[in-house]
Image: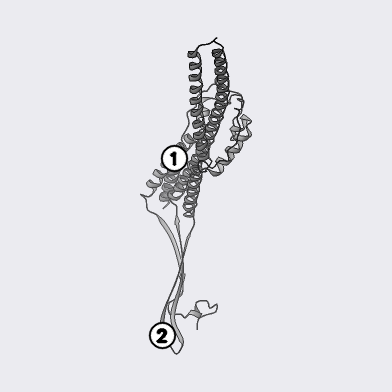
Amino acid sequence: MLLLVTSAGLLSCQLERGERPRADLSLPGQFSGSGTQAVGDQWWRAFGDGDLNTLESRALAGNFSLESAAQRLRQAEAVLRQAKSELGAKVDGELSGSVLDVSEGSIGGSYGLGLGASYEVDLWGRIRTRVAAEKLRTQASGEDYRAAAISLSAEVATTWMQLLEARAQQDLLLEQIGTNEKVVQSLEGRFVEGQGRGVDILRQRQLVEATRERLTVAELQSEILEHQLQVLLGRAPGTGGLPTGGSLPSLPASPRTGLPVQLLERRPDVRAAFARIRAADAEVAAAMADRYPSLSLGASIGTSEGNSASDLFRTGPPN
């Protein structure tokens, strides 16, 4: 018996070992490509653009893809709670009854009430290992949510900057069209006075029409970007409500990235992949534990089916 318990303890320690030794590598103290600006969760605030801050808040609150990632995280947390419940005892109840005689307005019958409890002794660490696997999967789902939030915030910022650029191009093209039309008027005045050529007027008018064509393209591009931005915010395209800012913000200082290996470790998609690898390793350990016998303890209590309904809740001895 002592040998069996010792073997079970050694096997449990072996199955639950999830950490792997890390190589001791000498790394440089700094990286030449790193900046000075600290990178926070709300990195877009470094631009100092109030409209961008508003758009980011709306997107994080209303984007449907991000909400799907949040629901997957809640699902993983629910599965984890279910796996943790296997560590405790299970309690089952049963109530049965049958009608035996119905006569002269009275009903007779028999009823039974049963209560049972069972508990599995986790000899080989199978339950604990599966709980550890679900914890790692929940961690991976949380990293997926962070990755989705980072991707969403980056896409909102990029689309907003592109929209500001398209609006600035429209203003510049409108100004250019006004200048070109003034040149046309000047050439026409010189032509009337006999000091100009008709071909110069034709070329200038062609330049005006070409600029108008570029303005049309810029307007279409602005409309497309507005629709994309509204979709990112969780709204239907064309509903309006976007800020009317028209100038690009000044660039902040370069972010402090640290060493390339540190940048890699901060990526949530990499951390999620690593957590899933560790979860798969824990599942292998749980599958190995399933090859060995399990030990379950149980107890039950109940009443006989011959009792009446009033006897089920009687506190004193039966008649």
Q: Residue 40, percent across and down?
A: 60, 33
- Residue 276: which numbered mark, if any? 1
Q: Earlier in the sequence, mark 1 or mark 2?
A: 2
Q: Nearer the viewer, residue 253 or 283?
A: 253
Name the foreground residue: 275 vs 56: 56
Regarding residue 101, the answer to whether it shows in the image is yes
Amino acid identity at mark 2: Asp
Instruction: Relative to 194, say whether 256 is above or below.
Output: below
The residue at the point 42 percent across, 58 percent down is 296
Tell me which amino acid carries mark 1: Arg
Residue 138: x and y in percent read: 49, 45
* Horizontal side, residue 173 vs residue 110: left or right: right
Residue 290 against residue 302 in the figure, above or below = above
> Is label 2 in a helix, a strand or a loop?
strand
User: Label 1 to label 2, Cα distance in Å?
Assistant: 62 Å
Which residue occupies 63% across, 34% down?
A: 50
Give the image location of residue 209, x and y in percent: 49, 23
Q: Which mark is residue 101?
A: 2
Q: Is residue 190 above or below residue 96?
A: above
Residue 29 seen by the camera = no
Task: Say few, some or many: other residues with alpha carbon within 10 Å of mark 1 (under 14 / 14 to 19 / 20 or more).
Answer: some
Q: How is the image coloured?
A: one colour
Give x and y (percent) for residue 244.
60, 34
Q: Nearer the viewer, residue 304 or 28?
A: 28
